[in-house]
Amino acid sequence: MSTYTQSETQNLQRSLEGITVTGEAVRGVPPESAEFLIEITASAPTAAQALRDNHVKTTQLAQAVAGLGVQQADLQTISLNVYNMYSQAMQGVPGMGAIGQIAQIGQAGFGLMGSAQVAQPDVQFGSYYAKKTLRVLARDPGRVGEIVDAAARTGATVTGAFQFRPSDEAAARKAAVDAAAKDAKAKAEALAAAVGKQLGDPVAVSEDIIATNGTYAALRSALPFAFGAGAPQMTGDLEYYARVSARFRLQ
């Protein structure tokens, strides 16, 4: 069993005394860009042809979105893979198709005579499949829907979620945390005054921040019919929610 001296006990009690508060703040900033991933696929009898066809589709995509503010540098290749596709060819009796049975009519009535030739599967090389994943940077977040439509017309497929970002995300986070810290101190000062004390130095501080970005805009871009024709044509602000927990001494 551990024991404390009188001075140690007094120090422990003083460290437990005080006020603990939680400050909160939300800061909204307009998004200035958006990112999302797309896939471009092509198949051909040879790997070289599949890659060439994939390159052609990529060029068509770049041309389709160029008029919407997406520059060549805004299309970043994340991955490019080529896969072997295999097929099973059923080798049956020459002149006959798949497995079957021939129904014959006998003198005594109807009967089935086993004329089924069991085919043996033969694994053969099939086509080659080339898949490229691109990261698309939309410098105008309000045109994300148009960019997705243009990409889809070239055969590309959108994968993953939309990521909307401000021009300076670090500054947005700092502004939210600073505001939450000021809110925590103001609450502590009010509580100290309410009990006839003065606020002392902080002895512990912790923070947490949550960013929500572009949920409404992403859903509207993917499912415009779900919101109706009267839905506002807007992206909405990015929200940074900060919580700061602080413990102050009382004087």
Image (spheres, rainbow, N blue to C red):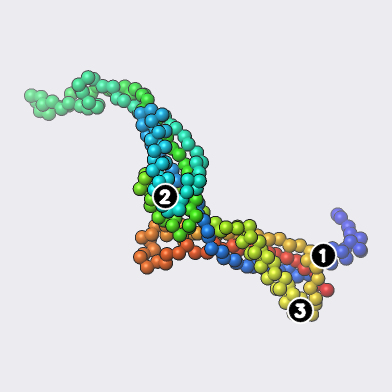
Where is the C terminus found, in terms of image quarters? bottom right
- Secondary structure under the numbered disc 2 in the rendered image: helix
Q: Where in the figure is residue 191, as x and y percent of width and height?
A: 73, 76
Residue type at numbered disc 2: Val
213 relative to 115 in the view: left or right: right
How far separated are the C-alphas under marks 3 and 1?
20 Å
Q: Where in the figure is residue 125, as x and y percent of width and height?
A: 37, 25
Q: Nearer the viewer, mark 1 or mark 2?
A: 2
189 relative to 151 in the view: left or right: right
Residue displayed at 38% across by 35% down: 53
Q: Residue furthest right?
A: 6
How far separated are the C-alphas under marks 1 and 2?
62 Å
Q: Residue furthest left?
A: 107
Q: Nearer the viewer, mark 3 or mark 1?
A: 3
Residue 193 — which label?
3
Where is the N terminus found, in terms of image quarters? bottom right
Q: Nearer the viewer, mark 3 or mark 2?
A: 2
Disc 1: which residue: 15
Residue displayed at 34% across by 22% down: 122
Q: Where in the figure is residue 66, as x and y percent of width and height?
A: 43, 49
